[in-house]
Image (cartoon, rainbow, N blue to C red):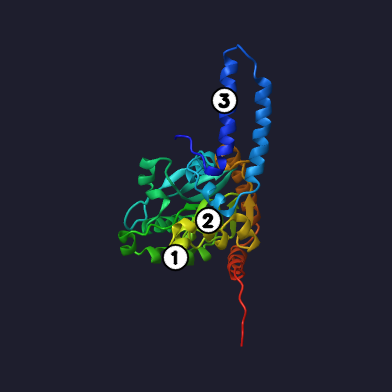
């Protein structure tokens, strides 16, 4: 994949170019630029810390969409090399935008549900840009019920711009498929761990996003609608997405403050795409930790706690 940089990353890119130029000159052996390179590297680290410590909500949305960011299969195959993918909803077809299967982490048998985007145009067409159709949600439910049968915890990795809005999806019952999953996941008798690894948009994410614990990577977002969609509705102008992102409060820290997100997973400095191995190892360790905590509860306690978790979300006031 060609190098991709966001607008606010360009000052870092300029420094990288300077460093690379000096390194190339040093290789000729005519002049030693090691001192200058060392100084520029220090400036680079300071600049990265400055930029990524003061990101706006819209900039975090952009980072969540970074095309070099690790996707579900990057996490799953690294965390569980023995991963076995399972296919099909047994009703219509196999939705490639949603991967599901079983694997182990440190001896713990896990069922994975992951929303999968592509790394290039060809893969994105194959994965439908990470937008699931009804058969994707029905496949997820089939695998989750199998997981309950064998008493395996479920780990769902969320990363989607939304459920597929096409005519065929609507004809095959998109809304019903998502609603069915919401209902079934509230009473699934095994631990469910939800991790937002990129975008968590609308019912497309919520369709596999009901669980005991909601974890979000530092530079991800989760909302009832995308900033562009919100801007299009409120101002008839998708160009006001930055303003919408601020109003929606979509980031991990926002949702933690609202008591929707249970835990924020710190990313490598500069975002998950800058050190995939590090962020995968971090997520792996946290999955083991969280599942060990959830394993302490009986099935009845687990479902009761899950229900109470969602009952607490939101604020209201009764008036006479």
- Lower sequence index among marks 2 and 3: 3
Q: Are marks 3 and 1 in contact (CB under 8 Å)?
A: no
Q: Are marks 2 and 3 in contact (CB under 8 Å)?
A: no
Residue at screen point 58% across, 31% down = 16
Question: To which residue does mark 3 refer?
Answer: 20
Question: To which residue does mark 1 refer?
Answer: 233
- Image quadrant of residue 214? bottom right
- Image quadrant of residue 1? top left
Question: To which residue does mark 2 refer?
Answer: 242
Q: Position of residue 124 (x, y in %)?
A: 39, 45
Query: Does dot 1 land on a helix, a strand or a loop?
Result: helix
**Is residue 87 shown to the viewer in this render?**
no
Query: Does dot 3 land on a helix, a strand or a loop?
Result: helix
Q: Are marks 1 and 2 in contact (CB under 8 Å)?
A: no
Residue at screen point 66% across, 57% down = 296
Up/down of 268 relative to 223, above or below: above
Residue 107 versus residue 3: which sits nearer the camera?
Answer: 3
Distance from disc 2 to disc 3, alpha carbons, whole Å, reads: 34 Å
């Amino acid at each position: 994949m060609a190098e991709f940089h966001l607008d606010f990353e360009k000052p870092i890119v300029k420094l990288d170019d300077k460093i690379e130029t000096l390194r190339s000159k040093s290789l000729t052996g005519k002049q030693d630029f090691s001192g200058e390179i060392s100084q520029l590297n220090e400036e680079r680290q300071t600049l990265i810390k400055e930029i990524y410590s003061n990101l706006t909500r819209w900039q975090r949305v952009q980072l969540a969409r970074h095309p070099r960011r690790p996707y579900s299969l990057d996490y799953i195959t690294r965390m569980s090399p023995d991963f076995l993918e399972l296919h099909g909803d047994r009703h219509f077809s196999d939705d490639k935008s949603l991967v599901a299967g079983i694997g182990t982490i440190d001896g713990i048998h896990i069922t994975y549900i992951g929303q999968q985007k592509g790394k290039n145009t060809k893969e994105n067409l194959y994965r439908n840009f990470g937008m699931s159709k009804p058969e994707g949600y029905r496949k997820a439910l089939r695998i989750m019920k199998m997981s309950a049968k064998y008493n395996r915890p479920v780990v769902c990795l969320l990363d989607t711009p939304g459920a597929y809005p096409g005519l065929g999806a609507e004809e095959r019952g998109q809304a019903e498929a998502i609603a069915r999953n919401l209902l079934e996941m509230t009473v699934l008798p095994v631990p469910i761990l939800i991790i937002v690894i990129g975008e968590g948009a609308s019912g497309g994410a919520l369709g596999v996003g009901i669980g005991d614990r909601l974890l979000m990577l530092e530079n991800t977002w989760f909302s009832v609608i995308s900033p562009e969609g919100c801007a299009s509705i409120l101002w008839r102008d998708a160009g006001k997405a930055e303003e919408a992102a601020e109003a929606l409060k979509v980031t991990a820290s926002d949702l933690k403050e609202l008591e929707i997100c249970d835990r924020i997973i710190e990313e490598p400095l500069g975002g998950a795409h800058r050190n995939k191995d590090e962020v995968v190892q971090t997520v792996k360790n946290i999955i083991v930790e969280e599942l060990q905590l959830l394993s302490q509860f009986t099935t009845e306690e687990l479902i009761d706690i899950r229900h109470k978790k969602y009952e607490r979300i939101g604020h209201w006031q009764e008036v006479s």
